[in-house]
Every structure is written in structure tokens, then in C-alpha cells.
Image: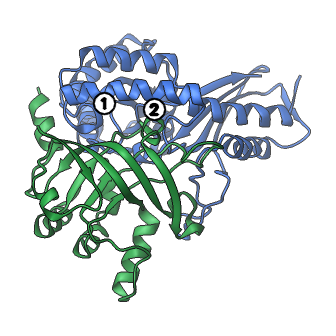
Chain colours: A green, B blue
């Protein structure tokens, strides 16, 4: 298992070298979106309209942060379960999305899109939300403010720790890791 | 007759919503520490270390342990000799949720309608389970329940012939298929017997037990221990990335049931197994 520091936006060559199980430290901009925002993004794509942000080389973090307390950049902000975004993800990958951060396994259609277009799925530690918030230095709502916690935010992250959960050649840390410790 | 002021209930609900979200119970912390000691997977060990560090930050800085600060579930034991003064019980509880989630900067995760999907903006309403009991007790558990673990819940109406083996298979298979989604290491709540709805409520009520506590019935106590071993042999591990610490505890609540039935339900708590209790 290798360790990498990557800056966003990601290039396809960055993504293709990552293998399930690698530790990655991310810095730069990542966008937040979860169920409701994904639905709206895909509706825009279906209508041929422009998205609120370019997806080219970008990473989406599946998170609905807690409200920001006074004096902090953001409230607690750990990952939500990713499979709920599976129905929407292939369309976003086809439009340039290179990375996703969440928790839990993705389905075959997402994996197929990741393989075809060169995208990677990272896992962050679910429930380590206060700890993770320390690696987020800026947060600004850029779309869908009416969705509250589910609004799309542009986050600035520094050394945000993630693990490559599913890679662009079909590698999967969930199946591989669990098999190793099954008795 | 004991009189309790509705405003007092509001104040306690608000306080417990915040406390439950900021401070992990001592029993849970101890169980994660023990898991950290015995976890064989290096990745799993690192995750458990992060969870302990996270709990410390959350407590010190009064930040939520998890950004999913839950839908507020209330388990209330209300003595029939108690009278609520100066307002009604349900309003008092919801007012407390509103206050706690606003003042504590907790996430509002409740939608007014499941299909319209518009946020109520204050995390109300709570789901309230009230049991009327003799005497003048007022015992209230405040349980913020996260969506990720709740989504992995299951109910099955087994055949009586399936017996204890059927129950075991249901529990183990449910934890296996839930995999990483409920944020393991989990606490497993199992309701057995009763009716369709009662076994589901019992599976959630089971999660209120302190980790390390023994089931009063030796048969169920043994069954809990056996299931904990079997669930941990699945290899799911912390965050589902592989390891030997998949669950911190298995708790069973059994209830009398119909001669034709063997209902069983499973409700999971993530490692942020949040619940606080107050007696008024």
C-alpha cells in the first residue's frame, strides 16, 4: 500500500496510479453534495443546462456538515453513506468528475464508469466528523442554499486523510479487506 | 401525585440532545478502547484510534461526534401518578429538540414529509415511545439516531420452525450485508417475539443497554455472547475495511408472541452509540 499527497483538481494519470488500500492526503478544493443536490445536478445535465460548478478533474465529498459554530471554519463534517448517490454518479463521472469521498461500497454501474473514465472512490472515516473538520480550512455555499446541510459547498481542505476504497481498475478494499479477516 | 413542569422537560430534552451528541458514553469509549487493543488489521486499528481522538475533540470543543446528529427518538417511562403542568408533553419534548438542535449547532435532519422532502428546519418532530408505568417515575431516554445505521434495519417474520438458528442466521446475515454502511464497529439491537411492530421497537430499545451489561435471562445472555463472536468473525471490521472488531455488543430484547409467529428485528447503532437518560 502506497501513500500519496494529491492536489485538486486531479488528472487522469493521478487517478489511474491509485490502488485500493492506498493512503492519500488531499489538499485543495473539494465540493460537497449529497442526495438532494445530486438529484438537481443530474436533472440539469439531462436538460442540457450548465452546472453550478465545473466537474472537470474535481472531487465530490458526500457530506452534510453540522452548522458552523462561531469561530470555526465548519461544523463536524464526516462522510455519509455513498450507495445512495450511485444512481446519479455515472452521469457526473461522464462529465469530468474524477473523485468521490464517502463511506461504504459503490455498485457495478459506478465502478464501470470509474474504469471507463478514470475516476477513484475514496473512503473517509465515518463518524470521525469533529476530527475531519480540522482538515477543512474554508467552506462556502455555492449552490442550493435552500437545501441547508445538503447545499453544495466549496471546501478548502489541507491534508485531508482518505483511503482508496475502490480504484479505477476494479480494486475494492471492502471485499479484499473483509476476506482477509473472515474466520 | 407528582407534578412536573413542562418547561423543565423542554430544558432537559435540550440539554440531553446536546450532551448525547457531544459526549460519547463511558461504556462506548471503553469498548472502542478495548477494540483498539485487540484489532489485528492495521487500517482497522488506525480507524479506532481516529474514533477515540474524535470523541476527545468533540467533548472538549463541544462539537458533534458525527455530523449526522440524528432524528431524536425518545423512550419515556411515565408513571401514572405524574401530572405534566403548564403545557402538553409532546409539545414540551419537541420544544426541547428545537432548542437543543438550534443552540447546540446540531444538524437538522428531519423532513416534514417523506416524499415532499422539505426540511422542517429545527429537527422536529421527535419520535416518542411512551410506556405508562405504575407510580410517579418519569424516566426519559434521549436517543439521536443516525440515518446511515437506521437504513440497515431489518424485520423478518420467521417461521416458528426456524427457531433460534433462524434468529442467529438473520442477525449474522444482516450485519454481513450491512457491511460498511452503518459505520462499524456497531452495536446490534435485536427484537425477538412480540408482533411485527413490537419487535422493531424492541430492537431499538435494546440499544439503550449499557455495553458490558448482562442480559438478566441466562439463555439470552449466552445467545448475545455467541452472536457477538460470530458477528466479529465476519471480518467486516472498523468502517467495513476488514478486521476483527465489527460489533461492540449484541443486545436482545424478547417478548411473548403468537403461536404462529417468530418475528425478529434488527436495529443497528453506529460506533457513535448515543443515548442519555434523565429521571425527573
As drawn, the label of residue B272 is 2
Report which quarter residue B16 is drawn in. top right
The residue closer to the viewer here, A92 or A23, is: A23
- Secondary structure under the numbered disc 2 in the rendered image: loop
Q: Where is residue B105 shown, x and y percent of the image?
A: 64, 44
Query: In the rendered image, is residue B177 in sight?
Result: yes
Figure quadrant of the C terminus of chain A? top left
Dot 2 alpha-carbon crowd within 10 angstroms: few under 14, some 14 to 19, many 20 or more: many
Q: Are marks 2 and 1 in contact (CB under 8 Å)?
A: no
Going by the image, does B233 lie left or right of B122? left
Dot 1 alpha-carbon crowd within 10 angstroms: few under 14, some 14 to 19, many 20 or more: many
Q: Where is residue A85 shown, x and y percent of the image?
A: 34, 62
- Outermost residue to the right: B86
Residue at 41% across, 23% down: B52
Please tell me if label 2 and label 1 are on a single chain: yes
Q: Where is residue B48 shown, x and y percent of the image?
A: 33, 26
Which residue is identified by label 1? B47
The residue closer to the viewer here, A87 or B47, is: B47
- Secondary structure under the numbered disc 1 in the rendered image: helix
Compared to residue A136, the image places residue A14 above or below, namely below
Query: In the rendered image, is residue B211 in sight?
Result: no
- Outermost residue to the bottom: A48
Dot 1: chain letter: B
- Of the numbered discs 2 and 1, the one sitting upstream in the chain is 1
Residue at 53% across, 63% down: A141
Compared to residue A132, the image places residue A94 above or below, namely below
Disc 2 and disc 1: Cα gap in Å?
Answer: 13 Å
Amino acid at each position: 500500500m502506497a501513500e500519496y499527497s494529491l492536489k485538486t483538481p486531479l488528472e487522469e494519470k493521478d487517478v489511474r496510479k491509485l490502488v485500493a488500500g492506498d493512503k492519500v492526503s488531499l489538499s485543495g478544493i473539494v465540493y460537497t453534495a449529497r442526495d438532494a443536490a445530486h438529484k438537481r445536478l443530474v436533472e440539469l445535465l439531462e436538460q442540457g443546462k450548465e452546472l453550478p460548478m465545473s466537474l472537470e478533474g474535481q472531487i465530490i465529498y458526500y457530506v452534510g456538515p453540522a452548522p458552523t459554530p462561531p469561530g470555526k471554519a465548519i461544523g463536524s463534517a464526516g462522510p455519509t453513506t455513498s450507495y445512495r448517490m450511485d444512481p446519479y454518479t455515472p452521469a457526473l463521472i461522464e462529465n469530468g468528475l474524477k473523485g468521490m469521498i464517502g463511506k461504504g461500497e459503490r455498485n457495478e454501474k459506478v465502478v464501470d464508469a470509474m474504469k471507463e473514465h478514470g475516476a477513484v472512490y475514496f473512503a473517509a472515516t465515518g463518524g470521525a466528523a469533529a476530527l475531519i473538520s480540522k482538515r477543512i480550512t474554508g467552506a462556502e455555499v455555492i449552490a442550493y442554499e435552500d437545501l441547508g446541510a445538503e447545499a453544495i459547498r466549496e471546501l478548502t481542505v489541507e491534508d485531508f486523510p482518505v483511503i482508496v476504497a475502490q480504484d479505477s481498475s476494479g480494486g475494492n478494499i471492502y471485499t479484499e479487506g473483509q476476506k482477509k479477516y473472515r474466520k | 401525585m407528582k407534578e412536573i413542569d413542562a418547561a423543565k422537560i423542554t430544558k432537559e430534552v435540550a440539554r440531553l440532545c446536546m450532551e448525547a451528541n457531544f459526549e460519547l458514553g463511558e461504556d462506548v469509549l471503553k469498548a472502542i478502547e478495548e477494540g483498539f487493543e485487540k484489532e489485528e488489521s492495521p487500517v482497522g486499528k488506525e480507524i479506532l484510534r481516529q474514533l477515540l481522538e474524535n470523541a476527545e475533540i468533540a467533548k472538549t470543543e463541544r462539537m458533534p461526534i458525527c455530523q449526522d446528529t440524528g432524528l431524536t427518538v425518545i423512550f419515556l417511562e411515565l408513571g401514572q401518578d405524574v401530572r405534566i403542568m403548564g403545557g402538553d408533553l409532546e409539545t414540551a419534548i419537541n420544544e426541547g429538540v428545537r432548542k437543543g438542535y438550534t443552540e447546540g449547532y446540531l444538524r437538522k435532519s428531519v423532513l416534514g414529509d417523506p416524499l415532499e422532502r422539505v426540511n422542517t428546519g429545527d429537527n422536529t418532530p421527535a419520535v416518542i415511545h411512551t410506556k405508562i408505568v405504575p407510580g410517579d417515575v418519569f424516566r426519559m431516554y434521549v436517543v439521536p439516531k443516525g440515518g446511515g445505521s437506521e437504513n440497515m434495519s431489518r424485520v423478518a417474520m420467521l417461521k416458528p420452525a426456524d427457531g433460534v438458528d433462524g434468529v442467529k442466521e438473520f442477525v449474522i446475515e444482516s450485519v454481513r450485508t450491512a457491511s460498511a454502511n452503518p459505520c462499524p464497529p456497531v452495536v446490534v439491537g435485536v427484537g425477538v417475539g412480540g408482533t411485527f411492530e413490537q419487535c422493531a421497537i424492541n430492537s431499538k430499545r435494546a440499544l439503550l443497554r449499557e455495553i458490558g451489561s448482562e442480559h438478566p435471562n441466562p439463555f439470552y445472555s449466552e445467545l448475545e455472547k455467541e452472536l457477538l463472536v460470530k458477528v466479529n468473525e465476519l471480518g467486516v471490521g472498523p468502517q467495513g475495511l476488514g478486521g476483527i472488531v465489527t460489533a461492540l455488543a449484541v443486545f436482545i430484547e424478547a417478548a411473548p408472541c403468537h403461536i404462529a409467529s417468530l418475528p425478529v428485528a434488527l436495529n443497528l447503532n453506529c460506533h457513535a452509540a448515543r443515548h442519555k437518560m434523565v429521571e425527573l
